[in-house]
């Protein structure tokens, strides 16, 4: 049985449905696998947003500050809508940095559109600016390809990867599908009548998840009726309103609704069960698919070496802080910290692998 690996994705299709083959290296389109955006109830997202909006109040404890004091005047661009996974990640990071007295007066702002490539182009246009960073992830990698973006992640300066998060296969309360087996049976019988929603454009984590799932269970990817929504908030509304039969989204986006019974998570895409989530893994259900979304931070081209080091140091200190550790626990994110050249190498690999999977699925030429 052949195996295709996609960054944090491993697909081993069933024998009766053929295989995905590993493709040769090509080049690069709120994103990873969380991504994507993510991961909490609307109430939780609003809570994070409100908390981060203060962006100027520092904690009294200065133990986390650098010798030159907290970083000042930092802006973080979110290339997706408010309430999206990128948005929540950026605001949670801003709050953690401020609470640890590592940064002061952080402005988090949104520039949504085209799967994150509108924001990416804006960042690239900020060449040489030293006060701006962009929250991004797997979704932006794919969007560069599918939107034929002139700006690419290769034009940016990678600063650090922050988190990973598995996806959830979720249905609304009252769905006729109470198990993944039932859902797959109906999906295979008539893919067009079983629409799947996601908060990613083509090539993003919420889009790649059902496409790879379809490939693994024997549904032709070209027959998948995928409905894209602009961010996790809109997707959640569509799920609750039964506008889609099921959805693929970051676990954190629907965890609270699963606890209240408003949605049911049929499966998760992680290698192991997710703590606090009452749902099996796809692998335990005999679907050999593992998928992980990720999110990180990049800077505009032309950033000085001195400033690159300052931002790497800033995010390293945030990563090591008690405030960020608590954020990871509260949000259910997996720590995936990489910085500088290590993150740059990771991004290059992701560009190549995403391109290969998109070609394999027939989504790009």
Image: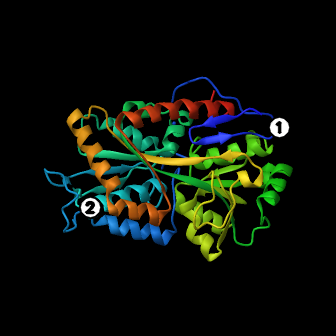
* CA distance separating discs 1 and 2: 52 Å
Q: On the image, numbered disc 2 is attached to which residue?
A: 98
Q: Residue at x 40, y 40 (%)?
A: 120
Q: Give the class, few, some or many, for how many residues have Cα within 10 Å of label 2's Cα (few <14, many ≥20).
A: many
Question: Could you tell me residue 209's position as x and y percent?
Answer: 64, 47
Q: Residue at x 51, y 58 (%)?
A: 38
Of the pair 274 and 70, the residue shown nearer to us: 274
Going from N to C along the chain, the mark reached first, 1 or 2, is 1
Taking 1 as reference, is 253 left or right? Answer: left
Judging from the image, the colouring scheme is rainbow
Taking 31 as reference, is 274 left or right? Answer: right
Q: Which residue is drawn at 69% across and 60% down?
A: 280
- Answer whether labels 1 and 2 touch (C-beta < 8 Å): no
Of the pair 280 and 196, the residue shown nearer to us: 280
Question: Could you tell me residue 173's position as x and y percent?
Answer: 70, 72
User: Quadrant of the rendered structure where residue 58 is?
Assistant: bottom left
Question: Could you tell me residue 98's position as x and y percent?
Answer: 26, 61
Q: In this view, does 362 lie above or below 136?
A: above
| Dot 1: element | helix
Q: On the image, numbered disc 1 is attached to which residue?
A: 15
Taking 177 as reference, is 212 left or right? Answer: left
| Dot 2: element | helix
């Amino acid at each position: 049985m052949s195996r295709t690996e996609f960054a944090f994705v491993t697909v081993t299709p069933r024998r009766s449905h053929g295989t995905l083959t590993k493709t040769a290296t090509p080049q690069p389109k709120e994103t990873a696998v969380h991504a994507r955006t993510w991961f909490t109830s609307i109430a939780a997202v609003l809570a994070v947003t409100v908390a981060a909006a203060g962006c100027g109040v520092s904690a009294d404890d200065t133990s986390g500050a650098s010798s030159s004091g907290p970083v000042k005047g930092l802006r973080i661009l979110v290339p997706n809508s408010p309430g999206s996974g990128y948005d929540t990640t950026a605001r949670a990071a801003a709050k953690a940095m401020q609470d640890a007295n590592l940064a002061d007066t952080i402005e988090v702002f949104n520039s949504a559109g085209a799967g994150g490539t509108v924001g990416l182009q804006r960042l690239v246009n900020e060449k040489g600016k030293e006060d701006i960073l962009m929250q991004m992830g797997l979704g932006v990698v794919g969007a560069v390809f599918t939107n034929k973006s002139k700006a690419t992640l290769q034009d940016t300066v990678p600063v650090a990867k922050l988190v990973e998060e598995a996806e959830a296969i979720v249905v609304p309360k009252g769905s006729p599908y109470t198990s993944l087996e039932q859902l797959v049976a109906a999906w295979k019988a008539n893919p067009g009548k079983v629409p799947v929603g996601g908060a990613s454009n083509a090539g993003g984590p919420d889009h790649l998840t059902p496409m790879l799932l379809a490939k693994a269970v024997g549904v032709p990817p070209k027959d998948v009726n995928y409905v894209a929504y602009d961010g996790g908030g809109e997707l959640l509304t569509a799920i609750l309103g039964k506008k889609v039969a099921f959805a693929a989204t970051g676990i954190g986006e629907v965890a609270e609704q699963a606890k209240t019974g408003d949605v049911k998570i049929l499966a998760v895409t992680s290698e192991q069960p997710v703590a606090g989530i009452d749902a099996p893994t796809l692998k335990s259900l005999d679907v050999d698919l593992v998928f992980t979304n990720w999110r990180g931070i990049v800077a505009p081209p032309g950033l000085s070496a001195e400033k690159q080091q300052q931002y790497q140091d800033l995010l390293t200190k945030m990563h090591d802080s008690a405030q960020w550790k608590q954020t990871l626990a509260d949000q259910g994110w997996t720590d995936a910290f990489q910085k500088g050249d290590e993150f740059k190498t990771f991004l290059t690999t992701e560009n190549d692998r995403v391109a290969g999977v998109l070609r394999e699925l027939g989504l790009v030429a």
